[in-house]
Image (cartoon, rainbow, N blue to C red):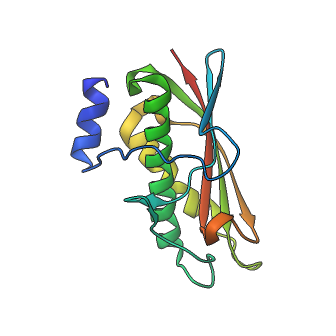
Amino acid sequence: MSQSVQSRLNALGIELPTPAAPAANYLPWSRSGNLLFTAGQLPLKDGKLAFTGLLGRDLTTSQGAEAARLCAINILAQAKAALDDLFNVERIVKITVFVASTPDFNEQHLVANGASDLLADVLGEAGRHARSAVGMASLPLNAPVEIEAVIACR
C-alpha cells in the first residue's frame, strides 16, 4: 500500500478489515479492464452489522453517516484485496449509496457524505467521485446503508 494512503489510514485510526465474503451467489468484486466494480458493502465492523434499521425511524442522520463511513472502509478493503495495494486505485469513479429509510426521510445525501468524506480523506483527490444517493424501503439483513463503487485502477 502506498505510504501516503497508509499514513492517512493511520492518522484516521483505520485498520482495513478482512474483506467480507459474499453472503450469496455473487463475487465481492469484478474487474473489467481498468475498472473495478465492488459488490454492495454493508456497515460491517468486526464482521457484524454495526447498525440496523431505517433512517428516520431507528437511526439519526449522523448514525447513518457513520454507517456509510463503515461501508466506505469495507469498499477500500475489497479494493485492496482485488488490487493488492491501494496505490493501484487511480480514482473512485462513482459510488451508489442505498439508504434504507422511512418514506418521509429526505437526507440520503447527508448520509452518503459519511462515505464520500472518508474516501476523500483517505485517497485525496483520487477519492473524489460522482455519486447517487437513493432511499430504499429495506436492505439485506436490515442494514441501513449499502454502498457499491466503481473504481478506476492501474
Could you say which is closer to the camera, residue 132 or residue 49? 49
The quarter of the picture where residue 136 lies is bottom right
**Image coordinates for residue 17, horizontal then vertical, percent:** 37, 47
Relative height, residue 11 to residue 59 (above, below): above
Q: Residue at x 22, y 44 (%)?
A: 11
Q: Nearer the viewer, residue 99 or 29?
A: 29
Q: Left or right: where does residue 71 sit relative to residue 87?
A: right
Specify whether residue 87 is in view.
yes
Q: Is residue 114 at all visible to an observer of this figure?
A: no
Q: Residue at x 49, y 63 (%)?
A: 67
Against 108, residue 86 (above or below) is above
Task: Tell me the residue at 48%/35% (across/down).
Answer: 127
Q: Position of residue 43 (x, y in %)?
A: 50, 60
Q: Quadrant of the N terminus?
A: top left
Q: Is residue 89 above or below residue 34?
A: below
> Residue 86, relative to residue 109: is it above or below?
above
Count of marks overlaid on the render: 0
Q: Is residue 86 left or right of residue 61?
A: left
Residue 44 is situated, as x and y percent measured from the top left of the image, at 46, 59
Residue farthest to the bottom, as pictured: 57
Q: Residue at x 41, y 23 (%)?
A: 84
Find residue 142 and report its horizontal and vertical position in percent. Answer: 63, 72
In the image, taking residue 61 as reference, residue 117 lies left or right, namely left
